[in-house]
Image: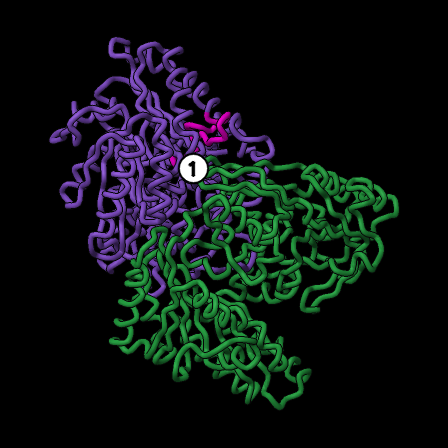
Chain colours: A green, B purple
Amino acid sequence: MTLESGEPKKPSQETLDALVRVVGEDYAIRDPEGMAPFLVEWRDRYVGKAALVLKPGTTAEVAAILKRANETRTAIVPQGGNTGLVGGQIPFESGHEVVVSLGRMTHVRDIDLDGNTMTTEAGLVLANAQAVAASAGRLFPLSLASEGSCQIGGVLATNAGGTAVLAYGSARDLTLGLEVVLADSSVWNGLKRLRKDNSGYDLKDLFIGSEGTLGIITAAVLRLFPKPAATVTPFAGLTRLGSAAAFFSRAYEQAGSALTAFELMPRLGLDFVLRHGADTRDPLRAPHAWYVLFELSSPREGDEVTRLAETLLSEGIEAKEIDDAVIATSLAQQNELWRLRELMSEVQKHEGGSIKHDIAVPVARVPEFIARANQLVELMIPGARPVPFGHFGDGNIHYNVSQPPSMDRTVFLANWETLNAAVHEIVLDLGGSISAEHGIGRLKRDLLRHAKQPLELEMMRKIKAAFDPNGILNPGKLL
Amino acid sequence: MTLESGEPKKPSQETLDALVRVVGEDYAIRDPEGMAPFLVEWRDRYVGKAALVLKPGTTAEVAAILKRANETRTAIVPQGGNTGLVGGQIPFESGHEVVVSLGRMTHVRDIDLDGNTMTTEAGLVLANAQAVAASAGRLFPLSLASEGSCQIGGVLATNAGGTAVLAYGSARDLTLGLEVVLADSSVWNGLKRLRKDNSGYDLKDLFIGSEGTLGIITAAVLRLFPKPAATVTPFAGLTRLGSAAAFFSRAYEQAGSALTAFELMPRLGLDFVLRHGADTRDPLRAPHAWYVLFELSSPREGDEVTRLAETLLSEGIEAKEIDDAVIATSLAQQNELWRLRELMSEVQKHEGGSIKHDIAVPVARVPEFIARANQLVELMIPGARPVPFGHFGDGNIHYNVSQPPSMDRTVFLANWETLNAAVHEIVLDLGGSISAEHGIGRLKRDLLRHAKQPLELEMMRKIKAAFDPNGILNPGKLL
């Protein structure tokens, strides 16, 4: 069975020619050099091969591609901005798969200011979607490191998260409707602009996060929000890791949905940023073992959020949850603080090899998770340097571990799977998830079989078989 | 095929005896008198028959019931508080179905204050869930007319909405995890307390809103929110229906998620309330054709929301969107205003027959929908009195039509299906939904076939066949 074997059939020359005719020669790439950028994961973790890269310009073309592919059992790898972190967008090494890149489909079909929705095609770059919303006086809140190149379709296929999930939710929560081309080439027009619709099963959420294995998302109705008119960004040094949960609760209880971000950072991560990041400086006088960077926003102008930040910080100091803090109110100051957080992932490469985990546990258990995982790392690889950081308020920690300074990089990285397995044991023991926001793709496919209940995998396989009986959509990914 | 025929097999005496043994004689009802309350829809719209009513006390008992039912092809009708408005919880007239009432499963398994979650069994009454959250210093925001008797399981099976959807979302948005017993008796433990989990297909949202046709929800992890510390409730007379959208936009842009309700009411509806509701009075000096009742909330004490309400009202008056308004700040005043809204459905029965619609359209198109539907009603049944009211901010209007005062009730009600069909044409033309929050159940099953695309129905049938191949779960409902 194609679904299980992961070994797609080699398409005939006739099939390839027919697929090229769908989009036209100008938008089909056959030569290896031209295809190369679509076949390489941006950190060089995966390098695949393809029979063809197609760049359809319309939903009808996507449907025509899938019709021919389904008839000929040709495997299709849908691709957005190629920024995924789990290899879901990269074909395997067989060279038999066809990459379908949605990047030409960038049309914004509708903006409804009263209804606070925006209907856009899948190829629109996230930053452009944000800009379109902003120029209409609205906020599209999804924000993540790759926003300059990732596309709406990929963002939805992976249910992307980022820094604004705390108040606004993940990509799933920001989507009201979808247009999807199914494996058999039928087009589902589910582009409803409705906040409430209880007429049947929730098909939309089945496609969101399915990583291109159930259908190809070609357009979406996205929710818009009032633009924040006042924002402050406090940065605080915690007295100890354990007080992060208490201080988060304090902030959430008083700010509610005005608490639009709450990020955790360790001193070592800040050290890396200060060492390798240009134009960075320590915001506080003395070093602290742990920091939180949070954000308070209001759709109204005025000093309401500044006063709230001051109250929270002084209460936090009094309760000995935090030691010291600064509040950034100007945009320049805020960008400076956010840059410390944003650089944290990137600078780790200057410190040698890094073994990564994208996990979530219940918020209250984040400190326990970090303590247990750090202890485990020290036992398994003495001298290795954990850099746990990320979206504390969502219970989502990027648990990255940098190599011991003196160790050989390759020797260190050979521990990747063993360390992953051990860290994931702790995550599962705490009721967590082995993939909080990056997805499963190719990287965590085998891990999924261990992390999920057999019943969950069975339900997923039934759905896959019902929607893509020939297994042509992104085979060997996720499931 | 059981799925299509809607005519379930008559269970043998042996099967019934075995089912009774699962829960014990004390929790099985066989006599018609004892079963009666479980077989009648509360407005007497549906009166069914059953072979048995079972009241399991544990998830294991639910699983044992479904094991036997699946083996013997016995149809199961899951039931919560029996408050549904579309007949989904009532068995058909064959007398061959078995009602499984979840009302004994009321245990609150966990409250996580740092993580803001509550894990509860399906039989907990919604008002009790709200009370448990409140006594822990948190808000469970789901609020609807039947909250005193509807249960969490039913609320999730129908993805219930209510008055707080605008800021907090529907039941779906308030749920992080589920425990579900599948048709083949396997138990899915999906009780994750995670805000972010991108490890595979979104199974949870498939069960939510599936009206008991894919599995029986036995427990859920619900989201909690900070308790509002300050709330104001303004009530305003609109200059005209058309200005509702502009005034809503104004309020939403400035209040953002502090706008926790925005309800529309027509003068005729208020007249009915003032005429038939005890201890009610008109909040404004002069009558207006249309009113909005909205709510602003903050997790912080202080007069912030009062000042915001004052600003919005004075701007609205200046922009000629509203004519006059009052602001309720005390709890007593707020309850008095909310009571006008809450009585609006109930008092209609004193004005003779009422033909109802629970529809949604994009927010900006609500005034257009009402204008077109009113025109249609006047054409079809001259003198009939439309009372369109409800959740304007969600685009969800309860478009109820009271009979002409002089008309015979039965003659009027004979127009039910014809009027529904005509009003739904307008809804679909405006990109709306024929069931915004009440679901499909038995009432709208035939309508669904017209309202949905054939492809949508096909996807739903595939999912149903994959999850319940013998069609034992609530057959003849929804699909």
Q: Mark 1 lies on which chain?
A: A
Taking B71 as reference, is B371 above or below it?
Answer: above
Residue drawn at point x = 39 percent, y = 84 percent: A286
Categorize mark 1 by other alpha carbons within 10 Å: few (<14), some (14-19), many (20+): some
Quadrant into which the C terminus of chain A falls: bottom right
Q: Is mark 1 on a helix, strand or loop?
A: loop
The foreground one among A241 and B70 is: A241
Q: What stretch is highlighted in magenta?
A: B427-446
Residue A39, image x and y in percent?
Answer: 74, 60
Magenta span: chief secondary structure: loop
Residue A267, image x and y in percent?
Answer: 46, 81
Residue wearing tag 1: A114
The foreground one among A250 and A324 is: A324
Residue A402, image x and y in percent?
Answer: 57, 81
Q: Is residue A448 left or right of residue B289?
A: right
Three-letter residue code for mark 1:
Asp
The foreground one among B291 and A231 is: A231
Can residue B111 be seen here? The reply is no
Taking A116 as reference, is A448 above or below it?
Answer: below
Residue drawn at point x = 54 percent, y = 46 percent: A132
Residue A93 within the segment the image draws in magenta:
no
Of all residues, the one furthest to the left in this rendering is B279
Q: In this view, does A3 lie to the left or right of A162?
A: right
Taking A132 as reference, is A440 above or below it?
Answer: below
The foreground one among B402 and B127 is: B402
